[in-house]
Amino acid sequence: MKRVTIREVAEYTKLSPSTISNVLNGKQGKASPETVQKVWTAIKELGFEPNFVARSLVLQRTNTIGVIMRDISSPLYSLGVRGVEDACAQHGYGVIVGNTDAQMEREAALFQIYARKQLDGVIVISASGQVKDDHVCKWNSAFPVVLINRYSDSAEFNKILFDHYHGACLAVEHLFKVGKRKIAHITGEIAASTARKALVERYEGYQAALAYLGLEGSAELVRRGYMGQEGGYEATKDLLAQKVDFDAVFCAEDTLAIGCLRALFEAGLRVPTDVAVVGFDDSLLASHTIPRLTTIRIPMYEAGAMAAEKLINIMENRDDSPKTVVLPCELVVRESA
């Protein structure tokens, strides 16, 4: 099927090609509302489709942003992408998504691909690691970059972070309110050199809440270096095998909490009567466990939408918002605690 050209639209409307082009690009100038309406009516009647490749060369914009995410299969990170897409759709922007599996070399390769494709900006949804400034700064000068859940010492990055510390305090305080006094903690790697900062903040919030509430905190109540459902299962089995006295478990991630629930069930313990369990993230699985998981919700969808709005405002030269925004987490109470 032959593509309708701007010249044919001009002949159809008896207007100049430059007028048609200006209307298409939002540069109506002195054109009357009647002229603008005439152009759009003709475009619809003729079935005109803009040549976006040529248009992007002229405008030096593709109206497309890239998303780089740590794990495309993660329900939590997918919520962030959904927020990005919904916000971009409202402004006429498309979205391209790439997955890194937490590998810096793959992240660098995606940045390079996005630069070659001349995308207008990039959003990075991470697992709260530390940005290697020499790695990302290079691309932050090529196009605007907004980070979600990713830390950096550099003041030049636009970041949307979460208050993991206060979220952990909420979890411990809730367990205290429901009568629990010996609260264990299962988390990932929190050694200084390799830690995800969010897990460190959750651990620090756990410790601070115990101290504030006058509860005993001890090394035997903490299990570090565990990941995923299997990690939560093994950590809980170890607590039971070591005959640690605990009546609640605060897990640093929902996946850990799901494994914890399985271990408690196999041990014949009732949740929450014998042992209460609280997770962190409010992933899509949290409301489908038995019992349903009480957890701390990270507003990932809202962060994605906010990041997209911020990026678009930067690209369109109308951004004056703070470079770093910290969003609060909230307690979601279900049956496990």
Image (tube, rainbow, N blue to C red):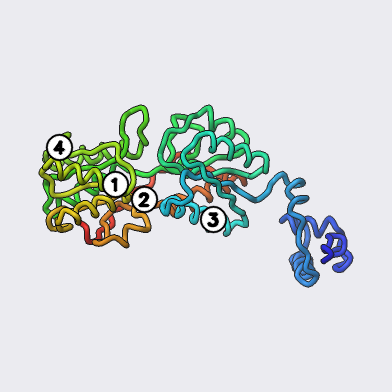
Assess disc 4: are there few (<14), some (14-19) or many (≥20) residues with their C-alpha within 10 Å of its C-alpha.
Answer: some
Residue 89 coordinates in the image, percent (x, y): 58, 58
Eyeballing the image, is 326 above or below 192? below
Q: Amino acid at mark 2?
A: Ile
Residue type at the position of mark 1: Gly
Disc 2 vs disc 1: Cβ atoms closer than 8 Å?
yes
Q: Secondary structure at mark 3?
A: helix
- How busy is the neighbourhood of tag 3: few (under 14 within 10 Å), some, or many (20 plus)? many
Please give the name of the residue rendered at 17% of the width and 51% of the height, measured from the top-left corner.
175
The residue shown at (48%, 30%) is 132
Alpha-carbon neighbours of circle 1 within 10 Å: few (<14), some, or many (≥20)? many
Choose mark 4 or mark 3, whichever is in front: 4
Q: SS of the residue at dot 2?
A: loop
Mark 4 residue element? loop
Q: Earlier in the sequence, mark 1 or mark 4?
A: 1
For the C terminus, give its image quadrant: bottom left
Percent coordinates x, y for residue 194 in the rendering: 37, 30
Residue 96 shows up from this direction:
yes
Residue 42 position (above or below residue 5): below
> What residue is pinned by disc 1?
167
Marks 3 and 1 in Cβ contact (< 8 Å): no
Frontmost of labels 2 and 4 is: 4
Mark found first going from the N terminus, 4 or 3 = 3
Q: What whole-number distance in Å separates the C-alpha atoms at marks 1 and 4? A: 18 Å
x%, y% of residue 76?
A: 41, 52
- What residue is shown with label 3? 85
Does the residue at mark 2 contact the one at mark 4 (Cβ under 8 Å)?
no
Mark 2 and 3 residues: CB-CB less than 8 Å, in contact? no
- State the image quarter where residue 10 is shown: bottom right
Give the residue at mark 2: 298
